[in-house]
Every structure is written in C-alpha cells, then in structure tokens.
Amino acid sequence: MKKYLKVSLTLLVSIFIISLLALNNHSVQDRILNIGLKNILSNAEPFLDKEDTLKVVICGSRSPLPSPGRAESCVLVEAGDDIYIFDLGNGSVNNLTQYQLPWPNVKAVLITHMHSDHMADLPDAHLQSWIQGRTAPLKVYGPEGINLVTKGFELAYSADYQYRSDHHGSDMLPMSIVGFDATQIIDNQLIPNDTPGLEILPFVVDHYPVNSAFGFKISYKGRTVVISGDTIDDGSVEKYSKDVDLLVHSAISIDIVERMRGLAPLPQMDKILLDIQDYHTSIKEAGEIARDASVKHLLIYHSIPTPRNTLMERVFFRPIEDVFENYSLSDDGTRVIMPVDNDEIIIDQIE
Ligand SMILES: [Zn+2]
Ligand SMILES: [Zn+2]
C-alpha cells in the first residue's frame, strides 16, 4: 500500500513539474493563448438565442456605496432579438463589453433618473455602439433635462470623437452619427418601439428631490417585468407590478446603514448615510410590495449597501424573512430568462 502511495505521489509531482516546464515553452504558451483569445472573441452566448424569450440581465447591481467587483445601476432587457438598456451606471459598459453585447441590437437606452450612478457610462456606450457600426446617434430616453445631459457629454467628448474618427477613418467611425438622440419620457406614455409584441410603459416614482424619476413596466408576449428605479414606497411600483413575473427593485437596509453610521470615520459619511434613508425603499417595504402585488419573483438590485458576503446578505434580507419567499439578490451578470410559451422563470449567471 505504502509503495503504491509513493508511486502515485511521484507521478503527481512529475506531472506538476512537466506542466510547469510546458507553460514556460513558447509554443505551448502560444497554443493556450490562441485558444483563450478564440473563446473571448467568439460569438456571444448570453444574448440572442433561438428561443423567443423575455430576458433580463443585471449589468450593474450596486448603489453608489462601494462594493468590489460590481458596477452601478444597469438593467438590460432583451425581447426577441431587440435589446433595451435601463440605466448605465459606472462600470456597466465594461460589464456589457465582457458579456459581448451585440450593440447593433440595442434599440435604446432609457435613463430612470439623472443621478450619476444611473448614467455615468453613457459616453462609453456611445463609443462601444459607434465601434460596432451604429447607424444613427445613440437613442436615449430620460426625464426632462435629458437633452442637457447628452449635450454636455457631446461637448465634453467632442475632441475624443474627432480623434477617433481621424484615426480609424470616417468609413468606420463617421462623424455624421456622433452624439445622442435624446427624447423626454412622459409619464404613462408608451415608449415607441418597433419590436413586435413589446410594450415599455414608464411611470413616475417618488425619489424627491429628484425631479423626475421613473419606473418601467415591460410586457412582451405575455411575460412581464417591472423595474423600480430609485424610489420610496409611494404605491406606484406596487400598482404597476400586479401579478408580474419579475420585479427588479432597489432596496436599502436601514439596519445595516444605521450600523455603518455608528462606524463612519467622517462626519460627511454619517450625514450621507442618514440622508439616503429618506428617498429609497427599505428591503422590508420591497418584500411587502412584492407580496401585495403577487409578483412571481423579486430580484433586488441597487442594494444599499450591497452585501459583500453570505452573512451580510442574511442580515440584509432578515426583514423580509416572514414577508415574501421568492426573492434573490442580483449580482452583476444575473440573468433571468422568461420563455414566451410557458410561465417558467429561469435564473442563471453570465460569467
Ligand atoms: Zn441610485
Ligand atoms: Zn437616485
């Protein structure tokens, strides 16, 4: 027995040493690198599969409070072959690039409200879509004043546009389509779109002093999603979420934020942690909304603060333990698939 053990151990050590030596060999390195690059650049898996589905991908799951490895607010909705993106917080376009988002399929970007954690990546979205052959300025919907935001970005990036067009050539990056095509969202007025079977309905939520802020109800061939945006529990999300398949809701843990206040090293931090409590929905309220509206699944995003480990996640969700059962915390890359021909809700993760 001892002898076998010794032989196996010698074999394992030999394999380990040979692997290490092989990894130092240039032709082995080249072959492994080429396989890796092919995998990275091969066709995107997470989007545009053959099945007709309503799909939601969380492309940014955190609030402005830092949480390593997560981007700020971003929710992608795919209906058939068309894609709509709700908010583009900091880091979200990096995620979308990693997920190999096919930008030509993105029909519009919709901004729930004009806080920076919901729109900081608009310039990067402009660049990525331009590179991938966008044929018109990037379509953006947002609250009143969204045109000033896009005009500001256009001004700030005017040199960048010119440099890139000069360098790569106007055939690839034409100056004629730089910039944004901004349209103001009107409460309760459907967002015009050419996707068969799709309805996008904005509704005003209360995120005072933000004026104005919207949530969205998206319906596609019988499947439904509501995105809350940032709001207090003013009844609007519940009203539009009656019996929906998926409610994507922002939430604050008053318990954890209060604990953080006690530990805040700066008085400014303590003030911010107090102020943010009065214009967000608590996790308990989010659970009650989901319960009272009879939603099938509650997916929490823009969590304040975003739990960093299982223990923190348990404490975060403590207030809804007895309120609502079918909930989960989203991560960047959390994907929800809702086929149109049955009532399944499949939740997985894009790596
Ligand atoms: Zn926010
Ligand atoms: Zn906000």
Image (tube, rainbow, N blue to C red):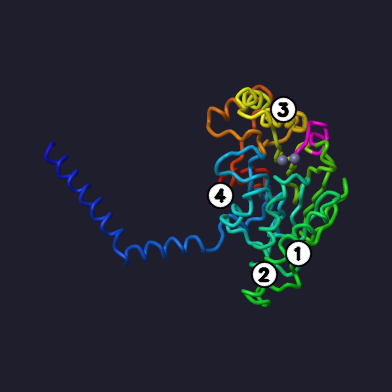
Q: Earlier in the sequence, mark 1 or mark 3?
A: 1
* Disc 3 and disc 2 in contact, CB within 8 angstroms: no
Q: Which quarter of the figure is the N terminus placed in?
A: top left
Q: Which of labels 4 and 1 is toward the front? A: 1
Q: Which of labels 4 and 2 is toward the front? A: 2
Kind of element beneath mark 4: loop
Ligand 1: give its quadrant: top right
Residue drawn at (56%, 49%) of the image: 350
Kind of element beneath mark 3: helix
* Disc 2 and disc 1 in contact, CB within 8 angstroms: no
Whether residue 287 is situated above or below residue 173 in the rendered picture: above
Whether residue 309 is situated above or below residue 214 in the rendered picture: above
Kind of element beneath mark 2: loop
Tell me the kind of residue under disc 4. Ile
Which residue position is annotated with label 4?
350
Q: Which of labels 3 and 4 is toward the front? A: 3
Tell me the kind of residue under disc 3. Leu
Q: CA distance from mark 2 to mark 1?
A: 14 Å
Which residue position is annotated with label 1?
179
Nearer-the-camera pick, 40 or 337: 40
What residue span does the magenta drawing correspond to?
A: 228-240
Q: Is residue 341 magenta?
A: no
Which residue position is annotated with label 3?
274
Instruction: List the single residue furthest toward the left.
Output: 3
Q: x, y percentage for residue 288?
A: 74, 27
9 left or right of 162 in image: left
